[in-house]
Image (cartoon, grey):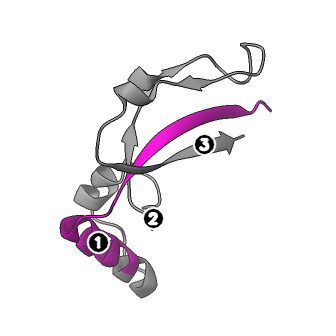
């Protein structure tokens, strides 16, 4: 089993995003199937509570698992409305 490390940008949640998270959570709590529209909106994953995750691959170079343990994020290539960057390790 391998591990991967990647970075995603996080934007502050919009009102629309908050409503969709609320709908997702309500379906879960009621034991209902999550509607396909919500599944697609959240990229078939649990919605993050801290904001909307966005792809920042264009700003990332290197791979911490292979390139001497280094990943570089070019801040000039990041969207201006990010609130933070999340570094994720997954198996």
Name the image quarter holding residue 18.
bottom left
On the image, numbered disc 1 is attached to which residue?
18
First along the sequence among labels 1 and 3: 1
Residue found at the very far front of the displayed protein: 76
* Picture layout, residue 41 above or below residue 3: below
On the image, numbered disc 2 is attached to which residue?
50
Residue found at the very far bottom of the displayed protein: 30
Q: Which residues are magenta?
A: 1-25
Give the camera-side residue of 44 and 69: 69
Q: Residue at x 32, y 78 (%)?
A: 22
For label 3, the SS is strand
What distance separates the C-alpha of mark 2 from that of mark 3?
14 Å
Give the camera-side residue of 40 and 10: 10
List x then y, in percent, for residue 5: 66, 34
**Circle 2 crowding by C-alpha within 10 Å: few under 14, some 14–19, many from 20:** few
First along the sequence among labels 1 and 2: 1
On the image, numbered disc 3 is attached to which residue?
87
List x then y, in percent, for residue 8: 48, 40
* Residue 85 marker: none
* Direction from residue 88 to residue 51 in the image, left or right: left
């Amino acid at each position: 089993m391998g591990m991967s490390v990647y970075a995603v940008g996080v934007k502050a949640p919009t009102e629309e995003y908050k409503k969709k998270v609320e709908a997702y959570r309500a379906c879960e709590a009621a034991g209902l199937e999550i509607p396909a529209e919500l599944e697609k909106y959240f990229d078939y994953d649990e919605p993050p509570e801290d904001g909307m995750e966005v792809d920042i691959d264009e700003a990332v170079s290197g791979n911490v698992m292979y390139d001497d343990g280094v990943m570089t994020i070019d801040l000039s290539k990041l969207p201006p409305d990010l609130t933070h960057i999340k570094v994720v390790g997954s198996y």
